[in-house]
Image (spheres, helix red, strand yellow):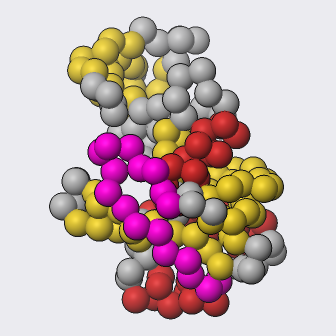
Amino acid sequence: MGFSGVTRSGGRRTERLYESEQLDVRGAEVVVRGRLQRLEWVGRPGVVLAIPYTHDGRLVLVRQYRSATDGCTLELPAGKIDPGEDPRQALERELREEAGYRLDAATHLGVLLTAPHFSDETIDVYLTSGEVVSQPHPTPKEQLTVELVPAADVDGLIDSGELSDAKSLSALFLHQRKEGRR
């Protein structure tokens, strides 16, 4: 599906303007409404996100420090897919690192574009079942705690604004749609 007014030539030439461990800033020249424009965006690795339930029906959430907001957010466990890793491997690793969670089963619910207006990041969303079997093993840059929440309490967390992370809310909406709820 194309966008009216944007000309694509089967593989634009992109330029890396900045590179770090977490992101790349890329640029390209693209014809928009008949005029050549210089566009930039943030390149990010793919991400996996779990909607992890324990066998007794509790949702596993993490309260994690986020430097961009200099505060903690309540969110679903998620993390980047490492080079050479498939999404299922990344899902198992991230759940173990962030929540001490042993993955028993996973169903792919869909893919989210986090911010297509400035980033190419995609998130593969999975509904999972398993158990918290150990303490989390976060990376040196992560500071987090695990919270087990009864499924019935999730709407209250959203209504109060405590659960306001956009990727988590979008994933929960995907889950509801797959269950036939709106």
Please indicate, yes or no, whether residue 74 appears anywhere in the rendered image: yes
How many numbered marks are there?
A: 0
| Residue 104 % position (x, y) | 78, 56
Residue 140 magenta: yes
**Vertical placement of residue 93 versus 83, above or below:** below
At x 34%, y 33%, the residue is 22
Residue 47 magenta: no
Residue 6 horizontal side relative to residue 139, left or right? right
Which portion, as a residue range, is magenta? 135-151
**Vertical placement of residue 53 versus 152, above or below:** above
| Quarter occupied by the N terminus | top right
| Quarter occupied by the C terminus | bottom right
**Vertical placement of residue 111 versus 174, above or below:** above
Nearer the observer, 55 or 83: 55
**Vertical placement of residue 150 versus 129, above or below:** below
At x 47%, y 85%, the residue is 157
Please indicate, yes or no, whether residue 123 appears anywhere in the rendered image: no
At x 57%, y 60%, the residue is 134
At x 29%, y 67%, the residue is 72
